[in-house]
Image (cartoon, rainbow, N blue to C red):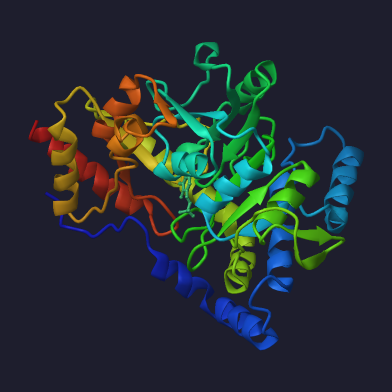
Amino acid sequence: MQKMEQVVFLDLKAQFSDIEKEVLSGVQEVCQSAEFVLGSAVSEFEQSFSDYIFSYESAPKPSLEQALEQRIQDLSHSTHPNRCVGVGNGTDALEIAIAALDLPPKSEILIPANAYFACVEAVLNAGMRAVIVDCEEDGSFMPKDSMITPNMRAILCVHLYGVMQDISAFEAFATKHRLKLIEDCAQAHGASDEKGRKAGSIGDIACFSFYPGKNLGCYGDGGAVVSKDISLVQKAREIANHGQKFHNGIWDKNNHYTLGRNSRLDSIQAKILHIKLPKLSQHNAHRMRCAREYCTQLERFAYLKLPSVFAQSVWHLFVIECCGLAESKRDRLLAFLRQNGIECGVHYPHALSDIATLQAHSDVTIHSSPNASRRSHNILSLPIGEHLDFSHIAYIAQVLADFEQTL
Ligand SMILES: *Cc1c(COP(=O)(O)O)cnc(C)c1O
C-alpha cells in the first residue's frame, strides 16, 4: 500500500490564508465605519450578488456586434435593481422566502425526501404543511402529477450537492399546477442550466446559505433571499427587519406594518462575502476539474455508483453510492477511508421520510421513499474543494482499490 496521506474534507484555514490581508482590511473598514448592522457593506454585497445571480452567462455570440452589445449591457449593471436581501442564515432565508409568498396558512409544500432537515423545518416554522416525496434512483428530484394535493401551493426545488435540477421541468410543473416555485440554492452558488440561467434566478423566489463550508461561505452564519420579482424582494426585506416599511432605500423605523423577525446579514460577513464573490467562478471551476478527475479515476470500481460527469453542477459535494452491498458496507468503507487519512461525510444519513420527529408531526405527510432511504444508507461524500489536487484523488482511488480487495 501507498504511504498514508491526510486528505481533509474541507480546508477553511488554507482558504483564509489566501485572502487574509484583504479580509482583515475589509473587517477593519467595517469597524472604522461603525456600520455594524445593515449599511454600505451589506448593500454593496447584495447588489453584487444580485448582479451575479441575474446576469446570464450567455452562450458565445454569433457576431462581434452582438457580443459588444451584450458587453455594454453587462457593464451597465449598476442600473440593475437589487434583487437580493441578506439575512441571518440559509434556514431563515427559506422561512422568510416562504413567508414573503403570502400563501394561505397550512398550505402544502412539496419537498424531496433527500433534502436537508432545514428545508422541512422552514416550511413548518413558516406555518405551512410539508408533503415529503421520494427522489429518483440517482438522487435527483422530479415532480410528478400524482404528488399534487388540493391544498398544494408551492414546490421546493433543492439543488442538492450543487447539481442544478431540471429546472425547466419544475417551471412547467409549477405553471401547470399553479404552484409557487421556491429554489433552495444553499449548495449551488453559481450553478446554471444549459441555457446559462443561474440557480436562484428562475423560480419565484430563492434562498442561499453562506455557512462557511458552502461554495460561497462567510466566517459565521449568513444567508440571502433573491427573487426576479422586486415586490417579493421588498417583502422579504421587510419581514427580515421586524416588518418595518422600506421606502426608496430608507427604513420607516418603528412602523411595523406586519409581524416580521430580526434576521439581517451581519455587515462584517457581508464585507467578507463581497471579497470572496469574485473568486467563486474560479473555485467552482476547480471543483469541476476535481469531479472530472474523480470520475475518470473511479470509473473502474464496479461497487461504486458515481455522479454523472455531465451534470450541470458546481460540485458542492462529490457523492458516491456504495451499491449492491449490505447496509453496513458503506459504514465499513467510511471507516476504511478514515483509517487511511481520508475525511469523508454523509449527506445526509437520514432521509426526511425516516426521521421520527417528522413522522410524528401532524403537519407532515410522508410518501413512501425507498430511493431516499436506500441512498441515506449507501452514500458517502468524498473530499472536494479548493484544497484538493489530483494527487489526493489518485491516493483516494488507491485506497478504494485496497478496499475492493477486502470485499
Ligand atoms: C446549508 C443548507 C441549508 C441551511 O443553511 P444554514 O445557513 O445552515 O441555515 C438549507 N438547505 C440546504 C440544502 C443546505 O445545504
Drawn side of residue 304 relative to residue 177, left or right:
left
Drawn side of residue 205 relative to residue 249, left or right:
left
Quick one: 34 or 59, which is closer to the camera?
A: 34
Drawn side of residue 403 relative to residue 242, left or right:
left
Q: Position of residue 237 (x, y in %)?
A: 70, 55
Residue lying farthest to the top in this orientation: 146
* Residue beneath the point at 61% across and 24% down: 170
Residue 155 versus residue 214 in the image, above or below: above
Quick one: 359 or 388, which is closer to the camera?
A: 359
* Residue beneath the point at 34% across and 27% down: 372
- The answer to whether residue 81 shows anywhere in this view is yes
Numbered-mark total = 0
Residue 338 versus residue 61 in the image, above or below: below
Q: Quarter holding the C terminus?
A: top left
Quick one: 129 or 221, which is closer to the camera?
A: 129
Q: Position of residue 89 (x, y in %)?
A: 53, 57
Residue lying farthest to the left in this orientation: 406
- The answer to whether residue 193 shows anywhere in this view is no
- Within the image, what quadrant is residue 272 found in? bottom right
Q: Position of residue 319 (x, y in %)?
A: 35, 38
- Within the image, what quadrant is residue 30 found in? bottom right
- Within the image, what quadrant is residue 292 found in? top left
Q: Position of residue 148 (x, y in %)?
A: 54, 16
